């Protein structure tokens, strides 16, 4: 298709139509589709509706085919619609929520999961997914923590890239691939006080080093679309933020894909108070480089007027529409507007056993064992267990943003364990006060108590912020109750955000299972019974107290650092709580025992084009085989800007046979030693660096190297620092 000729054949109204995205019920009134946002009357006439360019949400191939046919019949230009939807961690085969997937530290799994999502989506008539969400999250009060890959830019970037590759493959016109839309650009995860949609106000230094890399990773992986965020950044709503959309995205990163607003977020700039009406909102959107508005009509109703008044040019519209048409071309829609959608194949592809088995594999690797005193796990067939608590017989393991999934298809944990010959009773209760006499008698008989605690799936996700990230008090009472029965306690924790777990630390065992999707309980039972050795590690710190938020491992050092456990007045610490999290970033146990020793570097001195090798010996001192996630951190000892006390720069998930010893190596090059200044320019400075390898961000062994050259940078040249070096 010659896009330029097609573009030239469109009227200005038709061009502007391409820049609007509407929900399916605009095209077919009584269609059964769930969308996630307030639905308001957009006052559109039929002509405008049938000029729009894309659709938000779709359930299945037949629905898509019906809408596309109707649209193509009604529209003059016959340019197919694109169908976009939120396929976040599964279409109908549901994978672990992204924060759990990140706990696998296995981006290859995420890539494969995304490719299965693409397969199920495309055959069901969806061509673009609003995923991955790569907002860095350091505040567990924010409900959307569940949708992202945690607190660390490096780990999140690895998952960002993997998901984009999985969805798109090397050609999005293939009938089993979809285009990916990375979101929410930018810094949405920094919403103040963890309240959704709130202001983000961070320094550019933080922006470039912490918040932007995960979006950049998606752009480098050739992501086709990017969605703007709801928040303001530096006082300007991200949807109309020129610095983000033009200076960074288009000019610095050379992104040439489509930029879409979030749901109604162009119109919402009026509520932000930066536009007096829809017309000004439209002006600010096009001026900033926004291509599509989702579920609002500022563009549709006002862009033409703005051109007529010479406030904007038709060229600006042409640039946006060109990108949208190019995406339609890339998706193969001009050749076949229904490409991939196939109701018959849908039956056999969606939720097929292969996909479910893969969902289970991902789930198994996403589980994190936080505590296992006295080796309560694996379970024993010789013991009698009771599963108690509000989630004791739940099958609701899909979690937030799994709108096409069906929790009723998922199995219950107790049933699965029983079917394997384990002696299990389960009693689902919201409160210990609800137990009947018979139930209490039954509980007294058992050897150990399994408590299924946490939060329900509706308590995390969009618009689900909380001020209190403690487990509900009623759930602590389950622990007290189990203790009063003098029974060993195993906690299984279902949740979408880090919790303060201090009150349940008396449980001997805590297994963190987040929301693991369609095959959650098969995965959990395999871990509980020891068929699979747990290997997940936390992608986000778990605080001791809500007052520590934001808490993250890669913080800067203060001028008065506090040394844990050592009293030091006038150092940076709390009077009433430790500085350290309860469970640090990167933490997770195994049934095996991995011992680290002998960290070494190939060379202590490093020049700019050198690659040095840092290695460590790891011994599995146990009779269990399993995976260990080995983590490389770096600390820059003297630099122009204060640098994080530790930064993740590499990781490897390594299989160890029982009692096996291996030497694990990482290559370190100049990229690992560089960082961004506040203008987004790369700085690489001579000096000492500490390289650390460990099993989590806290337990590391370290070695120093000297980096002997540096790339000069204007900022630095002007600084006095240069003279000292
Ligand atoms: C969310 C986005 C989502 C969009 C479309 C918005 O409310 O913030 O993440 O992609 O709705 O459903």
Image (cartoon, helix red, strand yellow):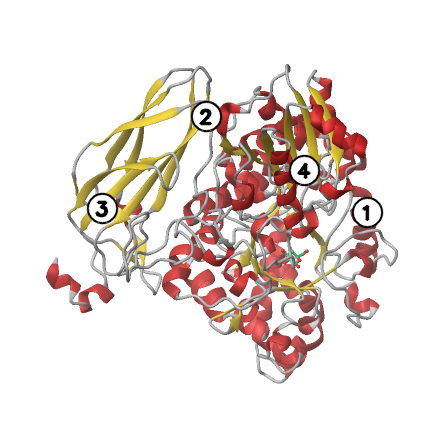
- Residue located beneath label 2 in the image: 627
Where residue 203 sits: x, y (%)?
A: 39, 66
Q: For the view shown, which residue lies furthest in the bottom direction?
A: 309
Answer with mark 2 or mark 4, whichever residue precedes in sequence. Answer: 4
Image-quarter location of ligand 1: bottom right
Decide if ligand 1 comes within 8 Å of the CB at mark 4: no
- Are the residues tagged 4 and 1 within 8 Å (C-beta)? no
In the displayed structure, does residue 670 sit left or right of residue 706?
right
Q: Nearer the viewer, residue 136 or 507?
A: 507
Decide if ligand 1 comes within 8 Å of the CB at mark 2: no
Please tell me whether mark 4 sits on a helix, a strand or a loop: loop
- Are the residues tagged 3 and 4 within 8 Å (C-beta)? no
- Quarter of the image for residue 172 reads top right
Q: CA distance from mark 2 to mark 3?
A: 29 Å
Residue 564 seen by the camera: yes
Q: CA distance from mark 3 to mark 4?
A: 42 Å
Q: For the view shown, which residue lies furthest in the right direction?
A: 30
- Residue located beneath label 4 in the image: 94
Please tell me whether mark 2 sits on a helix, a strand or a loop: strand
Q: Image quadrant for the C terminus?
A: bottom left
Where residue 28 sits: x, y (%)?
A: 85, 57
Answer with mark 1 or mark 3, whichever residue precedes in sequence. Answer: 1
Q: Nearer the viewer, mark 2 or mark 4?
A: 2
What label does residue 689 carry, if any? 3
- Dot 3: within a 10 Å radius of its alpha carbon, few (fewer than 14), some, or many (20 or more) residues? some
Q: Nearer the viewer, mark 2 or mark 1?
A: 2
- Residue located beneath label 1 in the image: 63
Answer with mark 2 or mark 1, whichever residue precedes in sequence. Answer: 1
């Amino acid at each position: 298709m010659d896009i330029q000729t097609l573009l030239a054949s469109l009227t200005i109204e038709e061009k502007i139509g391409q820049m609007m995205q509407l929900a399916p019920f605009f095209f077919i009134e009584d269609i059964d589709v769930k969308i996630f946002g307030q639905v308001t009357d957009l006052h559109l006439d039929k002509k405008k509706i049938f000029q729009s360019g894309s659709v938000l949400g779709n359930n299945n191939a037949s629905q898509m085919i019906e809408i596309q046919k109707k649209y193509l019949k009604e529209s003059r230009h016959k340019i197919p619609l694109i169908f976009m939807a939120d396929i976040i961690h599964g279409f109908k085969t549901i994978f672990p929520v992204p924060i759990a997937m990140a706990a696998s530290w296995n981006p290859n799994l995420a890539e494969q999961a995304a490719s299965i999502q693409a397969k199920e989506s495309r055959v069901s008539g969806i061509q673009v997914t609003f995923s991955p969400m790569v907002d860095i999250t350091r505040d567990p009060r924010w409900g959307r923590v569940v949708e992202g890959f945690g607190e660390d830019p490096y780990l999140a970037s690895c998952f960002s890239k993997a998901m984009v590759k999985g969805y798109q493959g090397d050609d999005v016109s293939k009938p089993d691939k979809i285009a990916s839309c990375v979101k929410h650009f930018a810094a949405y995860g920094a919403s103040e006080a963890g309240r959704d949609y709130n202001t983000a106000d961070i320094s550019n230094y933080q922006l470039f080093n912490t918040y932007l890399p995960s979006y950049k990773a998606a752009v480098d992986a050739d992501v086709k679309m990017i969605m703007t965020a709801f928040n303001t950044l530096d006082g300007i709503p991200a949807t109309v933020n020129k610095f983000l959309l033009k200076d960074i995205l288009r000019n610095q990163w050379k992104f040439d894909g489509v930029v879409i607003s979030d749901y109604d977020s162009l119109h919402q700039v009026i509520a932000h108070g930066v536009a007096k009406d829809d017309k000004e909102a439209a002006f600010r959107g096009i001026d900033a480089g926004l291509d599509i508005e989702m579920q609002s009509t500022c563009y549709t109703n006002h862009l033409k007027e703005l051109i007529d008044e010479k406030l904007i040019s038709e060229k600006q519209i042409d640039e946006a529409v060109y990108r949208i048409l190019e995406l339609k071309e890339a998706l193969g829609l001009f050749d076949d507007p229904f490409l991939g959608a196939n109701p018959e194949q849908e039956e056999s592809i969606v939720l097929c056993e292969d996909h479910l088995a893969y969902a289970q594999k991902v789930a198994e690797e996403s589980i994190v064992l936080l505590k296992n005193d006295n080796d309560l796990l694996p379970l024993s067939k010789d013991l009698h267990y009771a599963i108690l608590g509000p989630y004791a017989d739940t099958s609701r393991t899909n979690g937030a943003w799994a709108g096409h999934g069906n929790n009723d298809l998922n199995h219950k944990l107790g049933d699965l364990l029983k079917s394997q010959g384990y002696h299990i009773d389960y009693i689902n209760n919201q409160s210990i006060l609800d137990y009947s006499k018979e139930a209490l008698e039954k509980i007294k008989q058992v050897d150990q108590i399994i408590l299924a605690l946490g939060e329900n799936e509706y308590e995390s996700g969009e618009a689900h912020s909380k001020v209190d990230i403690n487990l509900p008090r009623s759930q602590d009472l389950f622990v007290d109750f189990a203790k009063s029965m003098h029974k060993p306690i195993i906690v299984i924790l279902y949740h979408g955000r880090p919790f303060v777990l201090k009150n349940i630390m008396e449980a001997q065992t805590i297994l963190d299972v987040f929301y693991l999707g369609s095959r959650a309980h098969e995965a959990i039972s395999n871990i509980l019974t020891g068929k699979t050795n747990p290997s997940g590690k936390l992608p986000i710190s778990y605080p001791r107290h809500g007052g520590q938020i934001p808490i993250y491992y890669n913080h800067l050092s203060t001028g008065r650092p506090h040394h844990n456990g050592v009293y030091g007045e006038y150092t940076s610490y709390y009077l009433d709580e430790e500085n350290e999290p309860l469970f640090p970033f990167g933490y997770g146990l195994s049934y095996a025992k991995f011992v680290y020793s002998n960290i070494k570097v190939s060379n202590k001195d490093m020049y700019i084009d050198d690659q040095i090798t840092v290695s460590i010996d790891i011994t599995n001192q146990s009779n269990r085989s399993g995976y260990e996630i080995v983590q490389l951190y770096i600390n820059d000892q003297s630099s122009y800007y204060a640098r994080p006390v530790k930064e993740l720069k590499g990781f490897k998930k390594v299989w160890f046979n029982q009692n096996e010893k291996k030497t694990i190596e990482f290559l370190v090059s100049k990229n690992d030693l560089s960082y961004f200044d506040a203008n987004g320019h790369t700085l690489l400075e001579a000096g000492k660096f500490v390289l650390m390898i460990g099993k989590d961000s806290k337990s590391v062994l370290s070695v120093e190297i000297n980096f002997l050259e540096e790339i000069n940078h204007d900022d630095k040249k002007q600084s006095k620092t240069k003279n000292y070096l």
